[in-house]
């Protein structure tokens, strides 16, 4: 009797496995969540920011590693490891809405003074078309460590370039237009006269 019951249970198990294999539609691929939700920090800036301009530019950055020796001239004898990275960076500039905006009627126009646009960091960049190239020679430092270094230092380098005077000058016309459009919409909601032009002046923040 026990043998018959055991055979019956074994037959049921085989049928269950066969049914599962028949209904299966192949392996399923999905992303593995590695970030603990409890470690997510939500930051809120009072008043928020107005995104006023964005620049997209292909940036190139390089990193060199070489051996040094206390006695002989190693740099002249041993070639360095040089890694170059090429990315399409997206520089975004914002103006804080919480700071004071001064709108003054000046005869035939409105004069609007707002804080200087600030670069949003970290700077975003496209990874789909990112290019990474490493050159080595005899007895050069390891290529892997050099490639890691260039990627690790890419963020700070893009942030440094984003506040360069040439970049700030390039985004200024778009920033002025965005602020003008925002100001005219606000004036219309407040019932102010809007047929006069609005001239925007950016002013450095006095906050420490």
Image (tube, rainbow, N blue to C red):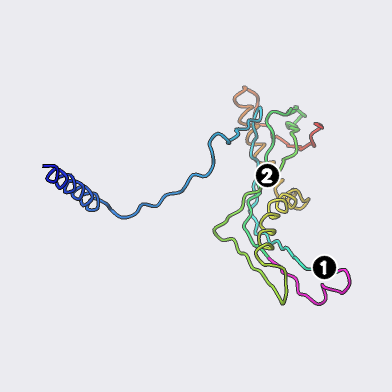
Does the magenta segment cover residue 77? yes
User: Which quarter of the figure has residue 154?
Assistant: bottom right
Q: Which residue lies at the image location 84% right of the left edge and 69% below the top edge?
A: 69
Q: Is residue 43 above or below residue 170?
A: above
Give percent across and percent down for residue 83. Answer: 68, 66
Q: Determine contact: label 2, label 1, CB under 8 Å.
A: no
Tell me the residue that label 2 is attached to.
121
Query: Mark 2, mark 1: which one is toward the viewer?
Result: 1
Residue under numbered circle 1: 68
Cα distance between the residues tagged 2 and 1: 35 Å
Write the start and end of the magenta stretch as one range: 70-83
Q: Earlier in the sequence, mark 2 or mark 1?
A: 1
If the image is split into quadrants, where does the N terminus sit? top left
Tell me, for residue 134, which label it has, or none. none
Q: Position of residue 192 (x, y in %)?
A: 65, 24
Is 34 displayed left or right of 186 in the figure?
left
Q: Determine the residue positioned at 82% across, 32% down.
A: 208
Badge 1: residue crowd in 10 Å (few <14, some 14–19, many ≥20): few
Q: Nearer the viewer, residue 130 or 6?
A: 6
Point out residue 148 in the picture as x, y percentages from the top left corner.
Answer: 66, 59
Task: Pick out the residue farthest to the top.
Answer: 191
Secondary structure at numbered mark 2: loop
């Amino acid at each position: 009797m026990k043998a018959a019951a055991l055979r019956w249970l074994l037959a049921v198990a085989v049928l269950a496995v066969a049914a599962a294999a028949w209904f299966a539609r192949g392996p399923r691929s999905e992303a593995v969540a590695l970030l603990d939700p409890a470690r997510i920090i939500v930051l809120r800036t009072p008043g928020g920011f107005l995104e006023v301009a964005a620049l997209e530019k292909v940036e190139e950055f390089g990193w060199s590693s070489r051996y040094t020796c206390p006695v002989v001239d190693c740099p002249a004898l041993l070639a360095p490891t040089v890694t170059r990275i090429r990315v399409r960076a997206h520089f975004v500039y914002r103006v804080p809405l919480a700071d004071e905006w001064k709108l003054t009627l000046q005869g035939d126009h409105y004069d609007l003074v707002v804080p200087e646009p600030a670069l949003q960091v970290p700077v975003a960049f496209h990874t789909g078309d990112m290019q990474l190239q490493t050159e080595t020679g005899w007895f050069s430092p390891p290529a892997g460590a050099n490639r890691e270094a260039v990627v690790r230092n890419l963020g700070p380098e893009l942030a440094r370039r984003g506040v360069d005077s040439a970049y700030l000058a390039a985004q200024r016309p778009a920033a002025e237009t965005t602020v003008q459009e925002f100001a005219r919409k606000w004036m219309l909601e407040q019932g102010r006269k809007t047929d006069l032009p609005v001239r925007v002046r950016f002013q450095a923040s006095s906050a420490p």
